[in-house]
Amino acid sequence: MIIEASGHPAALAKLDAQAQAILAKYDKKRAAMLTLLHLGQDTVGWVSPDVEAWAAKWTETPVVHVHAVVTFYSMYHQKPAGRHHVRFCTTTSCVLNGGEKLLGHVKKKLGIENGQTTPDGKVSLEEAECLCNCENAPMMQVDDAYHGDLDESKIDKILDGLQ
Amino acid sequence: MTEPVLSRNFTVADAWKMDVAENHGAYETAKKVLTTMQPDDVTNQVVAANLRGLGGAGFPTGKKWQFLPKESQKPIYLVINADEGEPGTFKDRYILERDPHQLIEGIIIATFAIRSKKSYVYIRGEYVESARRVQAALDEAYKKGYLGKGVFGSKHDLDIVVHRGAGAYICGEETALLNSLEGGKGYPRLKPPFPAIVGLFGCPTIINNVETIACVPHILKNGPEWFAALGSAGNGGTHLFGVSGHVNKPGVYELPMGTPLREMIEKHAGGVRGGKKLKAVIPGGISAKILTADEIDVKMDYDSLRAAGTMLGSAGVMVMDETTCMVKMLYYATKFFSHESCGQCSPCREGTGWAHKIVTRIYHGEGSLPDLDVLLKIARNMEGRTICVFADAAAWPIQSYIGKFRPEFEEYIRTKGQGIHRDYKEYDPRVGAPKQIGAH
C-alpha cells in the first residue's frame, strides 16, 4: 500500500512503539539506523524526507547524516517505488545462464528500464548486483522473495501474478 | 569424504526449528563447554584445529581471538559477518536458512571463549528470508533459556541481535560492516587499529564469518585433531563450496579443504553442461583471478590457490564453458565493481568507473586495441593504493581476463564483436537507461 506523502508523519507516528523496541536492542541509538529506515520504507513505500526526519529523531542524528546513509545503500528508495519491486540479477553466474537476454524480456514485458516504475505504479525494476542465489541462476527477487531457474514463461507467470 | 559436518542438517526437514535441531544434537556441545571448560581452553582448541576464517581472507580464527586485550574495561563484541555478497557465493545462506541453530550454538561457545556478552549478526538486506529464519531460531533459543542471563546455568550472559544491511557489497569488508552497523555509510576503516582493539562503538570486537562460527561446535565436540585432519596442511576442516555457472549440478558441496578443483567440477558438480568443453573457472568469487581449463588440477585451499596466483576467497566456484564470451564477462565484472565501489578512495572510485566505461565501449564494438593496455594500466594503479582491498579485487578480473584471453579480446575489438557475442543481437544493452556509477 502506498501512502500519499502528506500522510507520512501520521503513518510514522503509529510506529513509535516499534521504534522504541528496536532501539532497546542496540547499545547505541545510532546503530538502529538501518533497521528504522527499513521499517519506515516498509510502511510508506519509500524513504521520503519525512522518513528521514523520523529516523533522525529516534537515532538523535542530524537529518543530513540520515540522508547520506540513505543515498549510500541500494535498497532504500529515494523516490516512490512500485507496489512491487523487482531486482533482476546481472552478475556473473546469472549472465552465464542467459540472464542478459531474460532481463531484456523483463524490460520489454514491463515497458520500463532500470530504475523506472510502470505507469500504473505496480512494478519497479532494478538491475541488481549479485543476490547470491547463483545455484539457481538466472534469478530475480520480487519484493522479499527469491525466484530462481528463470525462463521467459516462468518470468511471465511471476509478473502476471502480481496484484 | 565420509560424513558431512556443516551441511549434515541441510536436507533435514525443518531443521531450523528448535525441536528438530535438538533431536539432531544441537546445543549439547555448548552446554558441555559452558559448564565444564575455561574460556582460554576453548580458544586453544580452536587454534589447534587450524580453523581459518571462511569468509574469504583465511585468517586463523583462534589467533584472531587471541588479539583481544587480556583485560578490557570496555565490553567485547562478537559480530557475525552474514553480509554474503561475493558473486558466486551462496553458502552462508544455507546455514542461515537451513540450520541457524548451528550458528547460534557457535556464537554461544565463541562469546564464552572471548568473554563477550553481546553479538550482532549482520545479514545482507536482501536476505529477508534468512533474517526471518535466524530471528525465529533466536526467539526459540531465548524461550528455552539458552540465551540471556546465565546461559545453561553458567555465569555467561549473552544477547544476540539480528541486524539487516541495506544493499552494499562493501559492507562485507569487516570495518565497513562496523561503520554500517554503527548507523553510517559503509566506508572501510584504516587499519591499524584492528577491530580486536578498536572495533564496534570503539570497543574490542571480533568479526567472524557465519560458516567459521558454525565450525566451532564441531571442533569442541570432536576435538581439534579430528578437525585439523579433515583438511589439508594448515587448512583445517571442510568447507562449503558453491559451484555455479555451466555445470550440470550447481549447488553447495561440503568437501575437505584441499579437494582438487577438477574433482569438484567433474565429479561433484556433474561436469560441464551439455557435453561442452571447459573454458575457464573463477575459483573463489568474482574477485579471484580466473583459471583456464589447463589450470584446474589445483587443490582448493588457501595456500595452494595462492601459489597458483589466485585465491580461495569465499569458495564461490563459477564455471564457464567454451561458448563463454570473455569480453561480456569482463563487462559484467567491471559493472559490478563500478557499482559497488564505496567511493571513499580516489583510485578505486575513479578507476572502477574508467575501467567500466572502456570495457563498455569494447563490448559495444567501439573499442580499439590500445584500450587493453589502458585497462591494464588503470588496474595496476588501483592495486595496493586504497584503504581496503576492494580496488585490488576490482583490478584482478581485468588483469586475469585480459592476461589469459588477450587474443580473444583483440579479435573481438577487430571484428567489433560480430559473430562472437551470442546474445548481442537479441538484447542490446545500449538501449538501456544510463548506467549508474557508484553507490546510489
Image (cartoon, grey):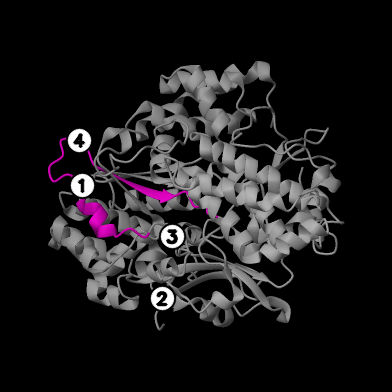
Crowdedness near tag 2: few (<14), some (14–19) or many (≥20) residues, C-alpha within 10 Å: many
The answer to whether residue B353 is seen in the rendering is yes
Q: Badges 2 and 4: C-beta atoms under 8 Å apart?
A: no
Query: Which of the marked residues, 2 or 1, is nearer the chain's N terminus?
Result: 1
Q: Nearer the viewer, residue B303 or B157?
A: B303
Q: Chain of mark 1?
A: B
* CA–CA distance in space, label 2 to label 4: 40 Å
To which residue does mark 1 refer? B68
* C-alpha distance separating marks 3 and 2: 33 Å
Residue wearing tag 4: B74
Say which residue appears at 75% left-offset and 36% top-offset: B434
Measured from the top left, where is residue B45 in percent x and y? 20, 65
Residue for badge 2: B258
Task: Identify the magenta region.
Answer: B58-86
Q: Is residue B120 left or right of residue A143?
A: left
- Residue at image point 76% right, 52% down: B363
Tell me the amino acid under the disc marked 4: Lys
What residue is disc 3 on? B17
Instruction: Choose mark 3 or mark 2, whichever is in front.
Output: 2
Marks 3/4: CA–CA distance = 35 Å
How many labels, in total?
Answer: 4
